[in-house]
Image (cartoon, helix red, strand yellow):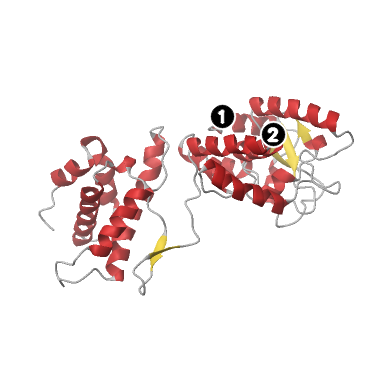
Amino acid sequence: MNDLSQSKLKSIDGEDKYDVLSIYLETLEHSSSSQASNRYILKEFFEVVQKESEKVTIHDWDRYAAYLNSRISHKSGKSLTISSKETYHGCIRGFYKFATPRFMREGKQFMNPIPDFKYSGLTKTIIRKGKENKLLSRDQMKKILDAARGKGYDKYLIFLIKKHTGMRNGEALSIRIEDVHLEERWIGTCLEDGARKSNKNGEKPLPFFIPKFLADELRLYIMRLQSLNPGNPWLFPGRDDRFYRRDSFLCVIRRLRSTSGVYFKGHWFRHTLNTYRKYEKQCPREIRKQLINHKTSESIDAYDEGNMKMRRDDYDKYHPYSEL
């Protein structure tokens, strides 16, 4: 293991990407033997997948996982133990957790390709945990939006709002037309029962800002909606004079997974927006929390007539999307 020199590792992953590997190994607060072990595992991984680190996909990991299942330990002459496989997986996933934001800072679309899972000692197969990646690329979001447009313009707009505001499902579905402020470019929500897990917000709306091009889309949609359904108070009307039901929306999501070819959940748009703000726009944590309304009570206190313009300026400055 000691003969695994830096030059050998560099040749595996490419000259231009060696710095990320080098920095990662140097940041490990372990013994020199632990660093050597991590270097060995990463070198073997890139030898198997034969790709540069930022080009690795989950399919490459699946190939490597199959390789681990068939690999024979040099020491014991037997198949790798479950514990050894967990060590290999933890090392490689740890590297990509470290590298992902650095690739994103370079303007690339990148997600950690190493899934979070546990090995089953009985079947030697991989069982996925409940934790998902939760980060969508711009190309994936476009596929979802294109598929949503085919289900109806209202469905398309719901996902547009979620993409550009980070609203939770219930918050996006329960918007009243009167709470859409197109000139000031903000939407008030969370006033209705069922708007979110903690029930309605109370007297004050929870504000979410929107870009101008989304305000223009909403203006045309509202004009058409009011001409077809006068007297309807909801931006996305459902049955029985109520807003669009959450369980109906979850059915839409399940259908869109099939038509778009992208597995996703509704809250992934929220997580993705917050992540892009952090790494692409270098948005400070407190501003991110306010823009996405992380905690309702704190968000309400942060907005008043005197600082709405400042918050809207923050939104424009740190918004990562320039397209619908």
Residue 104 appears anywhere in the view: yes
- Quick check: 224 left or right of 45? right
Residue 282 appears anywhere in the view: no
Question: On screen, 105 above or below 83?
Answer: above
Q: Mark 1 vs mark 2: which is more N-terminal?
A: 2
Q: Residue at x 26, y 58 (%)?
A: 67
Q: Position of residue 26 (x, y in %)?
A: 25, 50
Residue count near mark 1 (Cα–Cα under 10 Å), binned few <14, some 14–19, many ≥20: few
Q: Residue at x 75, y 39 (%)?
A: 188
3D distance between C-alphas at marks 1 and 2: 28 Å
Per the image, the residue denoted by label 1 is 317
Which amino acid lies under the numbered mark 2 shown in the image of this protein?
Tyr
- Quick check: 301 left or right of 86? right
Per the image, the residue denoted by label 2 is 153
* Nearer to us in this view, 193 or 156: 156
Residue count near mark 2 (Cα–Cα under 10 Å), binned few <14, some 14–19, many ≥20: few
What quarter of the picture does the N terminus occupy? bottom left
Front of the two marks 1 and 2 = 2
Q: Looking at this rendering, what residue extends furthest in the left direction? A: 3
* Nearer to us in this view, 158 or 215: 158
What quarter of the picture does the C terminus occupy? top right
The disc placed on residue 14 is: none
Which amino acid lies under the numbered mark 1 shown in the image of this protein?
Lys
- Quick check: 275 left or right of 292? left
Question: On screen, 17 above or below 267?
Answer: above
Q: Residue at x 86, y 46 (%)?
A: 241
Task: Provide the secondary structure element on which disc 2 rests.
Answer: helix
Task: Provide the secondary structure element on which disc 1 rests.
Answer: helix
* Nearer to us in this view, 262 or 81: 262
